[in-house]
Each structure stands twice: as structure tokens, then as C-alpha cells.
Amino acid sequence: MSNSPEVRDYLESDWSSFRRIIEEQVGVIPNEEDVTKSRNAELDSAISQARELVDATPDGHTDKPDSLYSLGKQHQNRYLSFLPSRPYLSGHLSHDYQKRKAAEIAEALHSLGEGLQSLYFETGEIGKLETAIVRLEEAVNATPHCDSFLADCLHSLGSAYRNKYGFTGIIEDLELAFRHHQRAVEATTSDDAEWTNRLFNLGDLHFSRYKRLNAIADLEAAFEKFQKVTGATQNGDLEQARRLQALVTVLYERHLRLKASEDLDMPSGHKGRGELLHSLGEGHYLKYDAGASKGTTDVDSACQRFQEALDETPNFVPERTKRLHSLCVATIYQALEAGRAPSTVQILQHLHEAFANTSSPTPSRIRVGKQLYALHVECEEWSLAAEVAQITISLIPRLAPRSLENSDKQNLLAEVADIASDAAALALKTGKSPYEAIRLLEIGRGVLGGSLRELRTDISKLQVKNPRLAEEYRINRDQLEALTSSADRFNQRYEAGQNIERKIRAIRQLPQFSQFMMGPSEDEMKALAVMGPIVIINVSYYGCHALIVEKNGIQTLKLPGLRRDGLRFRGVSLNLLGWLWDVIADPILNALGFTETPKDQWPRMWWIPIGRLAKFPLHAAGHHIDGSSRVVMDRVISSYSSSIQALIQNYQNHSKATHLRELGKILLVGMERTPGHMNLPFVPREVDKVRSICGSMEVHVGDGDSALEKILSALKDCDIFHFAGHGHTHPSDPSYSSLLLGGGGKQLTVSTLLKMNLWTRMPFLAYLSACGTGRMNHHELIDEALHLISAFQLAGFRHVIGTMWEVNDELCVEVAGSTYQWMKSHSMSDASVSEGLHRTIRELRVKWVIENEIRAAKRMPESLKRDSIDNHRIEPLERLARDMIFIPEEELPLSWVPYVHFGF
């Protein structure tokens, strides 16, 4: 019966519509005296019997949804009998009567919410859970604070949010679950039979929050609550094993975190079913993985428990994917420990079943997909590997729905590092086109930035074609962006996000708009290369390639000298720059025909390095001291982009933007002194130089107050933002990387910039004269390109000049002055930004060569010194062809390397 249409129709019905029908049908409100006593007795008896049936049906039993449905139906009958048809008539009812009605309505809502939640477990459909939450929230709101039933409602609501968090990974869901469970515990007395269960669930939420936020206070709180619960649990209690296993897990985590060896003396687990068995397996596997035990005992036990847990798990329920995956991982290591090859046939079968389980959470399927395509590669089944990787890539955008806060998107996307690179490499290996490889990279990388770009996409063509739909889309978009990060407002953000998705689907039904927000086509990519080639460099264990986009086509170039193994950036050096030339830049420039230094018109090109390669200075690759032109900056003007889509948006802005001289406002912020950081004595000189150059162009120069609020306000109507001061790259969370300001230690963070929308103005340039504004330390998020440079681009700036790592305070003055001077002499055109920076850095490189030769000459034999010093009479840009000798590398500070340009 649980799958019957009647049950589903009832559980999926909209409660607000139900209320409206009730109010229409109930014409006269009965006074309490008019209610037939026999009818009351019948209803009370039916409810009592239905409740007994629910209590007698174990959780997880296939009959549970039916019994909950029956209870909900009886409450519905009670609701129909007593609900007032007009609010103003409720004053005629006695106080006791109103209280009884409210309690019955709350019970009906609670039962309906529980039934919907059970149906979610049966089907895995998140919509059921969303509706359950709405009903349970109504039950909480309908229950008086002094009513003991409130604790039941709060506990059910907290459980629903906990289940939702398990599906979405959204931090707001976890916080709401925690809040409601905490209130439920506070509303439950210690002598209540439900107290231990509710305290256990609160402890479990503390542990979940610890795993998410890594706060030791949550770990200790979970430990304290689990101790109380296990102490209060009687021997033989059916929940004893599960509670002891939870305590063991927390104790082991405390051991890893606090190195408390006594924690390992606690019991290692007990036999149970489903979740308990899987938890036992996880405990054994964690112990094995951490090297806390010798031999294969724990990995063998983990395999046994995982298999038992799987045997208890029905097909196509969300938990099955995780349990299949756990069994496969443990089985692989068990085989390796035994010195034999794993049974790939059985493992592949399990992984394919897990991967095909569409009811499981998206992160679980992605983790399985990554292991599955890797195993197919091990078996040299390249086509199957490519197919699985492509499906895995298609799941990644689901991690970042538009309603999700950026912090939640970031947390979820940290698990998908390198998948896009692998998918692209496998596509090429199996004969797919270079366009298809780029398409996969665009889908699986820069997801967070892409979702923001889509919200801020140009709808001017839609405005002409269908003004009404364009206006509806704009209103929904503005509503979503206006909703702040708040657990209380998450449902509003979710609804706004759903509205936008509906509008996008409607827009795609229009002629000529079928590809609206669908990513760039091959023709769009080629049209983008009209100003110069775009080179995407993909690095994967399955192959390294350059994907070269030109106006006449897209080609693939293998890079056999480039390998994923050991690709770590450990600082810039002459050897590194030479290696980058030999294995990457030289074959690419040769393929493009850029084989010598231009005599007049300089070609431009854009680099899009993928993954770890994003940390390497491709624009500075070359052999800088041998006198040849085997140097990137002697062949082309380099710019960077995080993706093709980002470049397209830059190009669109470039084609319709107004020149700065017609706008004319510059915001200068100089931080010579920043509390807690080293003083920067050359900052005032840099600010004065920029002010002098820009002031001579009849452009208004506004000196910025270092207070964060004033800077944010001034950014809304400036055309150039120039910051000179300290930059900070956060070691683990790139959204907290920042420009350091005064005013109480406040910072202009990546997170703050991502919330800004300056696309209607499209300011000309953000010049970030600070350390590491294009740097990321979090490898797992490297594909998201979350740094200050990209944040300013996402906010709406057409061009950004920044740095890849630390810069020299004094040199910053010369770089800024020369770049702005070139821009001024070339009418502040879009091309003048990259040209100005390129010319400046190239000249500084020549000075660097000369200065280091002079220092080296002091160490040369006397017979060699004259040859070296006589060459100094050659003009700087002509000296590149001469032979440099005897220059020790340790005397070469490569301070001109880190400056980069992003933009079109």
C-alpha cells in the first residue's frame, strides 16, 4: 500500500490548498457543546489506534509510511471537524476549546511531516523532504511553548533539517538542525523516555559540525553528550550498540586530534544493523588508515562490517551508495595488504551500482565516479573511463545551486579537484574533439564564479525580444542577490533560486535563445580569439595537452615533457623559468608561429592554466641569461583568464564599455602602515606617482579612506581602484584572502567582493599593488580560481593587474608609474593595460640582467670583466641578444616576475 497513488497523492498534497478547501467546506463553526460526543469518541479511538500502529512499526520498516499515513489521515479528520472557517469567529470559542483545536492541528501537521519524511527515505526525492520541513515548521508554530508536544515537533523538525544537510551539505541546514535539536533537548526533562535519544542526536550534530568547521569545542561537546547518553543507557537496550559506537568514533577522533592514548582503550564496537554496522566498519577502517593498529585485523574487520551493512541496506536508498563505496575502498586495501590484486570485477560491479543510484547525495556519487573512472583506467578500459568521467562532470554543477551561499558552494566544491582535468584528458585519449575537452573543463571548473557570472549575464537581447520575460528574470535575480546569508532566510533563497530556474527554462523556449546560459559554443570560442589565441593547458595523470583556440579553429597539442607527477610550485627560479619554456611555452609558441621578437605590432595571447599549473608564471617562461629570444615576453604580450566563460564576459564588456576618459574617477588607497604588519615606506611615493599621472589627464582622483565601509561605497562609482599595501592569502579558506585595511583590522575579502555587483558600470581597472593577490594556497579549490584578482573581475572590473606572490615595495613604485604612463599615452584603451604592464616588466627584466651582470663581474677573472662591462653601453632593449656569462643564480632576485594582467 505504501506505493499506492492514494498515499502518494495525500502525502504530496499542498497543505495550503488543503486549508483553503477546508475553509470553503466548513460553513458553520460548531460550538463545543454542539460537537457530537459519539463523533469525538470515534475520532479519539481512531487516532489512538493509529498511534499504536505507528509505535508498533519499527523505523525503516516498509509499513512505516502506511502507518504514519493512517495517523495523519485520522488527524486530518479531526482537523476537518474542528477547524474554524473564519478567523474572526474564533473569539466565540472557549479558551480550552481553542487550545484543544491548536493541539490537534499541530499533531496533524506533525504526523503529515513525519509521513513525508518517511516517503523521502523510501524514494530519495528531496522535494518530499522540503515539504516535510514546511509542515513540521507549521507544527512547531502551532504548538504553545508550554506544551510538552513542542519537544516532539522540534525534534522531528531538527531531524528533517539534519537529513536535508546529509543530502545538500548546506551549512544553514546543519545550523537549523542544531538549533531545533537543542531546543528539543531543553524542552525535555531528564526523566522523559525520549531524553537520551534527543541528547544523543544533539551530540551527533555537534560531531557533524566539528567535521565541517573543525572547532574543538564541538568535538568536546559531542564527547560529553555521548558519555552522558551511554551512561544513562541500560544494558540490553536496542540503542546501546549504536550509542557506544558513536562514542568510540568520537574517542578515536579525540585521539587523533589531542593524542589522548587512553581514548583507544574504549570498546571498539558492537554488532548491529545498517547504520550501526557501517559505523563499526568506518571505525575499523579509520584505525587502519591512521596506522593505529598492526597487521590486517582492522581492514579485515572493516570489510566484514561494510558487507554486513550492505546486506541490511535495500536497493536504491540513499545510504546504499556510501556503503558500496566504503566496501570497495576497504576491499582494495585488504587485497593490497595481502599482496594480491583486488577483484576488479566485483569492485567495478559495486561501484557501477553505487554510481547509478540517483537517490544518493550528489557528493557521494561524485566520489564514487572519481574512483570508478580511475579503476577503469587501471584496467585500460579507456572508453568506459571517459564515459564515467563525463557523467561525473555533469554532476558537479549540482553542488552549487543558485540559492546556495558562496561559502557552502566552496565547501562542497573542494571535493572535486582534478576531475575536470581528468575528464578532458580521457576525452582526448578516446578521440573526442578539442572543443569537447574544453567544454568538459568549462563545466567542471570555476563553478562558483560561473554561477555568479550567469546571474549577472547580459540580458539586453532578451529585453528586445521579450521585455516581460526579461523583467521577470531581472526581478527574480535581484531578489536572490538581495537575500543575505541567514539560516532563517534560506527557504526564501531556495524559492528565489527555483523561480530563476523556471525563468531560464522559459527563456530557452524562445527562438534564438535555446543556448541561454548553456556555455560557449565552438563558434563563440573561435570568435573570441579574434584578438589573439587562447591557450588552455590541461595537466592530468592521463595526459597533458595544450588546447589552442584560434579564430580559424581549435587544435590539440600534446606536451610530452609535462607530467602531473610532482608538479609543485616551490618558488620562482631561473631553472623553473627555463623548464617552463622547454616543456610548455616553446612548443606552443612554435605551433602558433610566434618564433621571433616582433618588430612592430605585438601579438597578444591569453593563458588559461589548469589546476596546479595556475601557480606557475607562464608569462615569464624563458631562458633569460643566454642572450637569445627564447623568452615568452620577447615574443608575445601575455594575459590570463580563469576560464573561457570569464573571457567571453570580459570580451562582451570590452565591446560595449565606454572609455575611461569619458568616465573619469579614480580611487586611490595607500596603506603605508597596517597594524600588526611591516611598514611599507614606498607606498606614499607610489600613490603620489599614480595621482600625478592620472591628475594630468583631467581625471578626478579620490583618495580613499582606509575604512572598509567607505571603500565599499566608493567602489560603486569609481573607474579605477588602485590599492597599495599588504595583501593576505588565507592558508585554508580562499574566500578570506584579503586586502588589509585600517579601521579596526577590517579587511576587503574575496567573500565581500563576490557579493558586489558592479556590472552595470563595468569599472575599467583594479590595480592591486600588494602581495599574492592572484595566489591560492588551497589546492582542493585551485580549479575555482578564488583569489583577489578573480574576485574583482567577478565584481565587474574589466581589467585587473595583480601579483602571483610577494612583491618588492620599492619596485612597485616603478611598475605602477611606468604602466600608468603607458596607459595615459595610449588614451586608456583596453589594449593599453596589458601593453603597459608587458612593456614595463620587459624593461625591468633588462635592468635586472644588467644589474646582475655587474655584480657577477666582480667575481669574474680580470680578463673577462672588460667584455662584460663594455656591453653596458648597448641600449637596454637591444642588449637582449648578447651573451651573458658567469652569473650565479643566488644573486638573481626575480622581483619583476610576479606581476600579471587578467582581462580582455
Image (cartoon, rainbow, N blue to C red):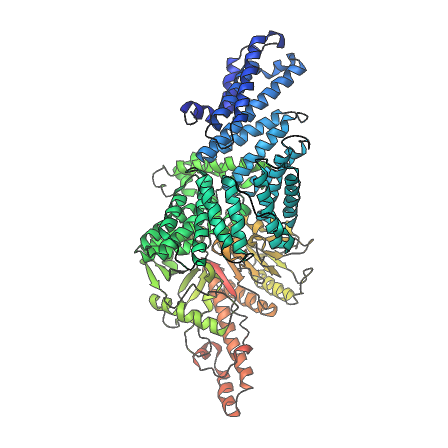
Image spot of residue 872 (x, y percent): 50, 83
Image spot of residue 307 (x, y percent): 45, 45
Q: Nearer the viewer, residue 378 or 652?
A: 378
Q: Nearer the viewer, residue 709 or 331?
A: 331
Q: Is residue 183 left or right of residue 479?
A: right
Q: How many marks?
A: 0
- Quadrant where the C terminus is found in the figure: bottom left
Q: Is residue 652 at least partly visible in the picture? A: no
Of all residues shown, which one is farthest toward the left?
431
Q: Nearer the viewer, residue 297 or 496?
A: 297
Image spot of residue 204 (x, y percent): 59, 41
Image spot of residue 310 (x, y percent): 45, 42
Q: Is residue 453 left or right of residue 79?
A: left
Q: Is residue 726 at least partly visible in the picture? A: yes
Residue occupying the point 57% across, 69% down: 814
In the displayed structure, 328 sits above or below 808; it is above
Q: Nearer the viewer, residue 16 or 168?
A: 168
Of all residues shown, which one is farthest toward the bottom?
863
In the displayed structure, 876 sits above or below 95; it is below
User: Quarter of the image holding residue 810?
Assistant: bottom right
Q: Is residue 280 left or right of residue 429?
A: right
